[in-house]
Image (cartoon, rainbow, N blue to C red):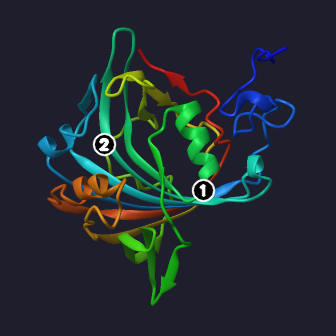
Amino acid sequence: MSYTFLPDRLYRMPTHFGPSLSPRQGPDGQRFDWSAHEFDAISVYYLSQASALEALLPPGFSLHGEPVVTLSFAYLRNLPWLAGRGYNTLGVRIPARFTGKADTEIGSLSLVLWENMADPITTGREELGVAKIFCDIPEARLSGGRTICEASWQGFRFLELTLDDITAVDPKAERLDLAPDTGGNLLHYKYLPRTGTWGTADVAYATLSPPVTSAVIKRAFKASGTFTYSEPRWENMPTQFHIVKRLAGLPVVKMLGASMLTVGGQFDLYDQRALS
């Protein structure tokens, strides 16, 4: 006799062994205690051109406010769902508005989120609808008063980000996110192809990560920032070269600044929802 799916439990492939573990579900179906978790977020902000960013928007989306691109590395520690382990990420976001049949939301649209561990990629793509892919992201380096972040794929370093003139600030007195205000919302576009009917979608809709109300900024710094892409050929990054080439080709009209934050809070994104 075949197995049956338990109600109100999360499953991912392979489903044959029972409910899956994720940031939103522990071994017994419980939510985790995130009180020991924290991460460092290192971001640069730059003004680009509206037409270049609009070309990256999925159906139902439009640009919101100034065409600001956010590049952000994050270094996560003490994750309860990974039994205290961590991983690193690199994200690219732009301010956007989603207008659907039932929902209208403003948020920071995640164009791509690289991570250096398979498990959060799988859970984030399938459960949350986040556009996650893999790359190597070592810990940030400190050298001569600079903070240096980098990302690579199979030995090809495609991005380096550097912070200079790092100064401690009071986050309550100074706004460090230099992109248009989107109220702390994150937007995503979930897309899965239909097996066998190539070129068509099995799933295609927007999702929303509401603000994390428990987030606490423990340390904050402002800085000046620069970044450099190494534009790949197909041979360098066979499945990702088109992504990096498009990002490297975005016009940089003006660098706006940079920030470095240490943040804690309950980041299981349990209240993630689909938009329609």
**x 43%, y 57%: residue:** 72
Residue 136, position as x, y percentages in the image: 51, 66
Figure quadrant of the C terminus: top left
Q: Could one spot residue 247 in this view of the protein?
A: yes
Residue 73, position as x, y percentages in the image: 47, 61
Does 4 appear above or below 134? Answer: above
Does 218 appear above or below 7? Answer: below
The secondary element bearing badge 2 is classed as loop
Task: Locate residue 33: give its quadrant.
Answer: top right
- Number of other residues with Cα within 10 Å of mark 2, as a class: few under 14, some 14 to 19, many 20 or more: some
**x 14%, y 48%: residue:** 49
Q: Amino acid at mark 2?
A: Pro
Please give the residue where the numbered disc 1 appears in the rendered image: 117
Q: Is residue 53 left or right of residue 14?
A: left
Task: Locate residue 241: give its quadrant.
Answer: bottom left
Which sits in the foreground, 146 or 270?
A: 270
Figure quadrant of the N terminus: top right
Which sits in the foreground, 213 or 230?
A: 230
Which sits in the foreground, 58 or 254?
A: 58
Q: Is residue 86 left or right of residue 241?
A: right
**In the image, which is nearer the foreground, mark 2 or mark 1?**
1
The secondary element bearing badge 1 is classed as loop
Q: How far, Cα to Cα, is label 2 from label 1?
A: 30 Å
Please give the residue where the numbered disc 2 appears in the rendered image: 180
